[in-house]
C-alpha cells in the first residue's frame, strides 16, 4: 500500500555543493584554494571543470551572469570551524573582508560572515 505524501519517509538531505558565482572563475579558484587550504582540487574532464572538495562539500566556482551575479544577495553557507578567530584571520589575510560579526550564539560559540573579493558571503561558526 502506498503511503500518503505526509507520511512518507524522506532521506535526510545533506549539503553536497556550494555554487559561487564570480566574474573570473580562474582567479576565484586560486583564491578559494588559498582560503580553504584543506580543500582538494577535483576535475570533471568531460566538462573541463575544476572545483574544490572540502570534506563532503564541493565548492563550485561558476561564471556570474545576468540571472545570478556575484555578491551578497540572500543565502549564506556557514562552515563549522575549530577556531573562529584563527579562521577569520586566515580569510582576511587571503583578501576577504569582515562583513558581519563576530557575534555570540548558543553554547559558547560565535559566528560571523566575510566576503570574498567578489562580495560573496562566507559564513563561519565555531568556538
Image (cartoon, rainbow, N blue to C red):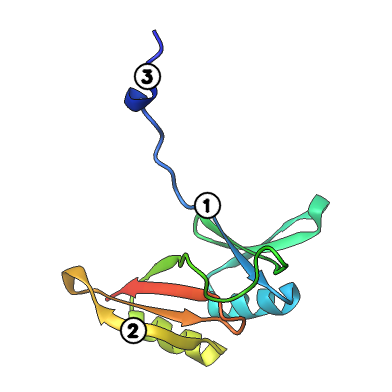
**Label 2 to label 3: alpha-carbon separation:** 44 Å
Is 35 rendered above or below residue 6?
A: below
Name the residue rendered at 39%, 74% in the picture: 124
Instruction: Tell me if label 2 and label 3 are in contact, CB under 8 Å.
Output: no
Circle 1 or circle 2, nearest the eye = 2
Q: Which residue is mark 3?
A: 4
| Image quadrant in which the N terminus is located | top left
Tell me the number on the disc at residue 16: 1
Rate crowding at label 1 as few (under 14), some (14 to 19) or many (20 or more) other CA atoms within 10 Å: few
Which residue sits at x=33%, y=78%? Answer: 83
Query: Position of 18 compared to 41: left or right?
Result: left
How much space separates mark 3 and mark 1, taking CA atoms? 28 Å
Q: Quote the CA–CA distance across marks 1 and 2.
A: 26 Å
The residue closer to the viewer here, 17 or 37, is 17
Work out whether mark 3 precedes mark 1 in sequence or the reverse, and give the earlier one: 3
Observer-nearest of 60 and 87: 60
What residue sits right under mark 2 in the picture?
A: 101
Left or right: where 31 falls relative to 107 = right
Secondary element at tag 3: loop
Q: Nearer the viewer, residue 109 or 53?
A: 109
- Residue 65 image point, x, y percent: 72, 67
- Percent x, y of residue 18: 55, 60
Amino acid at each position: 500500500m502506498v503511503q500518503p505524501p505526509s507520511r512518507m519517509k524522506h532521506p535526510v538531505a545533506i549539503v553536497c555543493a556550494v555554487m559561487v558565482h564570480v566574474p573570473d572563475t580562474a582567479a576565484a579558484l586560486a583564491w578559494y584554494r588559498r582560503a580553504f587550504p584543506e580543500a582538494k582540487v577535483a576535475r570533471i574532464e568531460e566538462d573541463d571543470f575544476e572545483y574544490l572538495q572540502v570534506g563532503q562539500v564541493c565548492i563550485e566556482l561558476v561564471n556570474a551572469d545576468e540571472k545570478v551575479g556575484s555578491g551578497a544577495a540572500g543565502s549564506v553557507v556557514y562552515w563549522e570551524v575549530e577556531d573562529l578567530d584563527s579562521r577569520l584571520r586566515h580569510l582576511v589575510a587571503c583578501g576577504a573582508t569582515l562583513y558581519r560579526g563576530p557575534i555570540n550564539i548558543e553554547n559558547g560559540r560565535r559566528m560571523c560572515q566575510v566576503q570574498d573579493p567578489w562580495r560573496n558571503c562566507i559564513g563561519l561558526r565555531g568556538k
